Image (cartoon, rainbow, N blue to C red):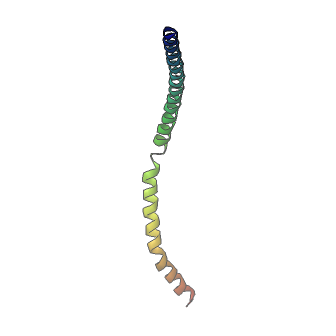
Amino acid sequence: MTNLLFLLTVVELILLLAVLAAYLVVIGNRLASIAGLFAKVTFGVRAIESQTAAIGPAVTKINHELEEITTALPALVTGLERSLGDP
């Protein structure tokens, strides 16, 4: 009887290891497919980065010009008020 229980335990352990190995293979395949999708996303993000690289310097230039306009506007408004005769 002890030999039978020992044999059944060994068979159960072998089945458990086989099922775990099968699930690990399934999970590995799924992770490989996800890695492929991440590679595509990375490629797309790099393409977007290269296409939008010129935006940064342009925005800096626009902000500088807008700051100059902002500093000039009060004097312009004052001059217009004087020329129109508004108090």
Residue 56 vertical position relative to residue 16 in the rendered view, above or below: below
Split into 4 quadrants, where in the image is the C terminus?
Answer: bottom right
- Residue sitting at 45 percent across and 45 percent down? 53
Q: Horizontal and vertical percent for residue 36? A: 51, 28
Residue 17 vertical position relative to residue 53 in the rendered view, above or below: above
Q: Horizontal and vertical percent for residue 59? A: 46, 56
- Residue sitting at 52 percent across and 80 percent down? 77
Q: Horizontal and vertical percent for residue 3? A: 49, 8
Work out whether residue 81 or residue 53 is closer to the camera in this orientation and state it.
53
- Residue sitting at 51 percent across and 27 percent down? 31
Count of number-bearing discs: 0
User: Position of 84 compared to 42: left or right?
Assistant: right
Q: Residue furthest front?
A: 1
Q: Horizontal and vertical percent for residue 6? A: 48, 12
Work out whether residue 74 or residue 34 is closer to the camera in this orientation and state it.
34
Work out whether residue 26 or residue 43 is closer to the camera in this orientation and state it.
26
- Residue sitting at 42 percent across and 63 percent down? 64
Work out whether residue 59 or residue 31 is closer to the camera in this orientation and state it.
31
Residue 76 vertical position relative to residue 22 in the rendered view, above or below: below
